[in-house]
Amino acid sequence: MSRAKRKLDHIEHALSSGQERTHGFEHIRFVHNSIPDAFVDEVDYSSEIGGLSLSSPIFINAMTGGGGERTKMINQQLAEVASECGIGIAVGSQMAAIRDPEERKSYEIVRQTHPNGVVFANLGSEATADQAKRAVDMLQASALQIHLNVIQELVMPEGDRDFRHTLTRIEKIKDAIDVPLIIKEVGYGMSRETAETLASIGVQMIDVGGFGGTNFSRIENARRERKLSYFDDWGINTTSSIIEVTEAAKGISVISSGGLQSALDVVKSIALGADATGFAGYFLKILMEEGQNALIEEINFIHKDIKMLMTALGASSLSELKEVPLVIGGSTKEWCEQRGIPLDRYLKR
């Protein structure tokens, strides 16, 4: 099967399978503030990750590219939405364009359409430093995402099987590029041990890519004759991943992704310690089923709702939001307790 055909298959399976919605945000509750000292019009939700200034805590996360005209059209539409809403956008893995120059246009359209915005380049952890520089140059990118998707590759019939020297390649890429580096999981979450390892080589941004959104194991299993179903429930949910990473690496910018669909998911992510949030499957579904205007309207509603929620909590900035008290229950609490991660710091703030 060609890489382009596989890209299109991924889109179709992602749309048909939907999102797990087992991300853990239902386990996070705010302690109500009856006297919030805040005003909706004065709420500032701008953020900074790895030295990059973001006007919004949400961005369109990596989805596609390299599938010919159809993925070019999707990326163009997403970039038009990002430009209209003033948010960042990431492309899918650019390895297709590295190997086949004809596919470059399906990625380059993003920077052409969003010339002054934040744009993230993207490659897998198998990439070399030279390929990373080419991916960044292709988009005049603001940052580079290196995605970690071991489980997806193992389930993918034609996927990688050798993951040796990944950390060495990441370190070489970090030293070779002149833009910030984001290490991104792809739906399986991030542990504190992994975060500590990445921090030890100077990584400054981690996208937790938690379990609970698009399930790439199920997508790849749908393409297999013999299913590897034991990977379908594999991973650390999004809320537990945020807690794990923030516990392990205090100086790292944390991005929350993995099943986010609402302003409440965003606000809970920030309160747990994230600095920004990535939306992928949810936005793709709206775009493909309802169109660009519907997606623009939804993003505008999310922005308005973030301000409403922050006002209710008495938080006029994201730094203040990170100080509001939380009660954590359910499987997120159970996970953290068994992992020896104290949760009282969230309640006693």
Image: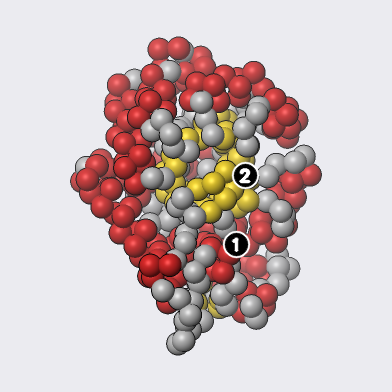
**Residue lying farthest to the bottom in this orientation:** 34
The amino acid marked with disc number 2 is: Gly
What residue is shown at x 73% (from left), y 29% (from top)?
Answer: 175
Secondary element under disc 1, as helix, strand or loop, is loop
User: For the C terminus, which image quadrant?
Assistant: bottom right
Q: What x and y, as percent, mark residue 68? A: 34, 20
Q: What x and y, as percent, mark residue 256? A: 53, 54
How many numbered circles are shown?
2
Q: Is residue 181 above or below residue 335?
A: above
How much space separates mark 2 and mark 1, taking CA atoms?
17 Å
Q: Quadrant of residue 26?
A: bottom left
* Res 193 visible: yes
Label number found at residue 51: 2
What residue is shown at x 55% (from left), y 29% (from top)?
Answer: 123
* Res 148 visible: no
Secondary element under disc 2, as helix, strand or loop, is loop
Q: Which residue is mark 1?
A: 273
**Callout 1: 10 Å neighbours few (<14), some, many (20+)?**
many
